Amino acid sequence: MKRPRADHKEVAHALRQHPGVWLPVGDYRNSISADDIARRIRTGYPLGNADGSTPYLPAGAYESRTELVDDGTRVHARYIGGAA
């Protein structure tokens, strides 16, 4: 079953609207992919999309964590602030 792609721009916007609140980013088939996305969110590192961008800036403005779910690993994040 194909998973829907996470809309990271939409997620980052929602996180900024609710500072300090953990929200789901997306579910990933394996923990390696989820851990990589979680790291990229925390560090503001590009997400690997064609334009090399990320909405999770500035670096350190977001925290992330992973959780095992029935069919993979879920990434959660929260906005903790930072200078734009």
Image (cartoon, rainbow, N blue to C red):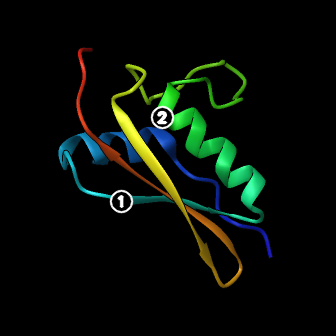
Separation of residues labelled 2 and 1 (CA atoms): 14 Å
| Position in image of residue 80 (x %, y %) | 25, 38
Q: Is residue 14 left or right of residue 65?
A: left
Q: Residue at 66% across / 18% down in the picture?
A: 51
Q: Residues within 10 Å of mark 1 (few under 14, many from 20)?
A: some
Q: Residue at 32% across / 58% down in the picture?
A: 22
| Position in image of residue 18 (x %, y %) | 19, 50
Mark seen at residue 42:
2
Among all residues in the image, which is located at the extreme bottom? 70
Q: Is residue 69 above or below residue 23?
A: below
Q: Residue at 37% across / 19% down in the picture?
A: 58
| Position in image of residue 49 (x %, y %) | 69, 29
Q: Is residue 42 above or below residue 27?
A: above
The kind of residue on which mark 2 rests is Arg
Among all residues in the image, which is located at the extreme top? 84
Q: Secondary structure at mark 2?
A: helix
Q: Residue at 59% across / 38% down in the picture?
A: 39
Q: How many marks?
A: 2
Mark seen at residue 68:
none
What is the quadrant of residue 24 in the picture?
Answer: bottom left
Foreground disc of the pair 2, 1: 2
Q: Which residue is mark 1?
A: 23
The kind of residue on which mark 1 rests is Leu
Q: Is residue 80 above or below residue 75?
A: above
What is the quadrant of residue 53 in the picture?
Answer: top right
